[in-house]
Amino acid sequence: MTRADEPQWRSLWSDYLRFYESAVSEEVYATTFARLLSDDEPQHALIAEADGRLVGLVHFLYHRHNWRIEDVCYLQDLYADPAMRGRGVGRALIEAVYAAADRNGTPSVYWMTTDNNARARLLYDRIGEVTPFIKYQRG
């Protein structure tokens, strides 16, 4: 991803955030994009392109884990343009994260989704493994 991708990246990420009924401030957009482009940050992004335009994105980061020596990889955001769904964009992006994690010596990759995200879960069930963990956050 390059600085020139920012408008299309922003559009895709905005659509992703809307899907999850969320939004972020302009400061978060700018900071996140800068972090994704920086070689000094643990955050990373990959994009999918078709016909010269961005049609998908994935954000991921590496972090320590107390049960392992090596880091683990958290696939935080995954989004494919609805017009491109069913064409392998999501799968290709997840597999690209798997490959990046392998190159980094980080074999464990995990992500979360909502229980009602049925379409995405059809893919996730084929290329991942459901865990018994339930997410909690500070109230």
Image: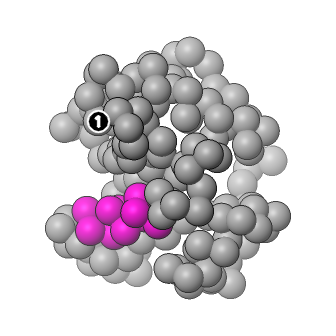
Magenta span contains residue 59: no
Q: Tag 1's secondary structure?
A: loop
Q: Residue furthest front?
A: 51
Point out the image quarter for the N terminus.
top left
Magenta span contains residue 100: yes
Confirm whether residue 131 shows in the render.
yes
Q: Is residue 86 left or right of residue 46?
A: right
Identify the residue under disc 1: 1
Q: Which quarter of the picture shows residue 129?
A: bottom right
- Give, as a single range, the part of the protein colored magenta: 91-101
Is 23 placed above or below 111 here? Answer: above
Count of all numbered marks drawn on residues in the image = 1
Residue type, mark 1 in image: Met
Confirm whether residue 71 shows in the render.
no
Q: Nearer the viewer, residue 96 or 109?
A: 96
> Where does the image place residue 71, in percent across and percent down from the top left?
31, 68
Q: Nearer the viewer, residue 110 or 16?
A: 16
Q: Nearer the viewer, residue 56 or 53?
A: 53
Bin the neighbour count of mark 1 within 10 Å (Cα to Cα): few under 14, some 14-19, many 20 and up: some
Q: Is residue 105 left or right of residue 12?
A: left
> Where does the image place residue 56, in percent across and percent down from the top left?
48, 45
Q: Residue at x 42, y 36 (%)?
A: 54
